[in-house]
Amino acid sequence: MQSPTEPITINQVDHTTALKVTIIVGSTRPGRKADTVARWVHVLAAGRDDATFEVVDIADYALPHLDEPMPPRGGQYSRPHTRTWAEKVGSFDAYVFVTPEYNGSISGALKNAIDFLYAEWNDKAAGFVGYGINGGIRAVEHLRLVLSDLKVVDVHSTVELTFADDFQEFTRFTPSDLQEKNVTTMLDELVARGTALMRPGRSR
């Protein structure tokens, strides 16, 4: 198994036409595991030749609590941080959300980041990597509901990382070979669904 810290071998991909996928780090909490998990997914994804992949960390955008005066469905973004976030999210064709489970749901930071935008999410595909005591399954199910209202098409296969099986002493990330296969299955579905949803001339 390749470590998240090892150099990534990248296959030749036509960046002008390939599906663009972002792996979103869905937590900003100090001591989080989402960034490590996202880098692991990126290592596994980078060897593919059917899409390009980039990790996007919501912490890097320092979004405040939603402060747009107008609902995002109108697309009237007035804050510079919103426009920067919208440009980044809108540049991708599909998403992999890496989410912990906090009290049976996703983090407030991820929900807030999603709520800032509307059209940028529409008609895109999404896959999920959850982690927690029970694999983050309730967080993923809540995330599916949130994204469905944004016209995001989710894929069935989900990666469920548990603290008992995929982390040593609840801290060091040590995913099993089976989880690598689960990531591949999820990405296969995501790329197929995302490619089918791509519209000619879509602005990135």
Image (cartoon, rainbow, N blue to C red):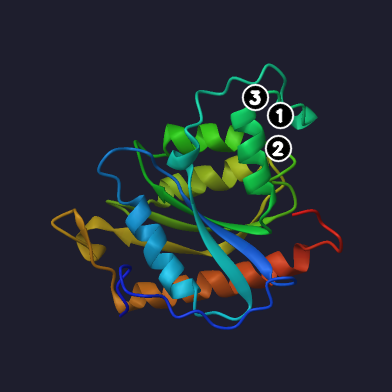
Residue 200 has which mark?
Answer: none
**Residue at x 25%, y 43% (from the top left corner):** 31
145 up-or-down from 76: above or below: below
Work out which residue is located at the far top of the displayed protein and give it: 69
Locate the N terminus and report the quarter of the image it occupies: bottom left
- Residue 67: image x %, image y %? 59, 19
Does residue 29 appear to the left or right of 46 in the view shown? left
**Residue at x 54%, y 36% (from the top left corner):** 113
**Residue at x 86%, y 64% (from the top left corner):** 200
The amino acid pointed to by label 3 is Arg
The mark nearer the N terminus, 2 or 3, is: 3
Q: Quick check: marks 1 and 3 in contact, CB under 8 Å?
A: no
40 up-or-down from 75: above or below: below
The amino acid pointed to by label 1 is Pro
Does residue 77 appear to the left or right of 129 in the view shown? right
Label 1 – label 3 distance at C-alpha? 12 Å
Per the image, the residue denoted by label 2 is: 118
Give neighbour class at mark 3: few <14, some 14-19, many 20+ (Cα, 10 Å): few
Residue 72 has which mark?
Answer: 1
Locate the C terminus and report the quarter of the image it occupies: bottom right
Q: Please, what secondary structure does the residue beneath circle 3 have?
A: loop
The picture quadrant where one finds residue 95 is bottom right
Would residue 200 be seen by someone viewing this image from the given angle?
yes
The amino acid pointed to by label 2 is Tyr
Work out which residue is located at the far right of the displayed protein and give it: 200
Per the image, the residue denoted by label 3 is: 79
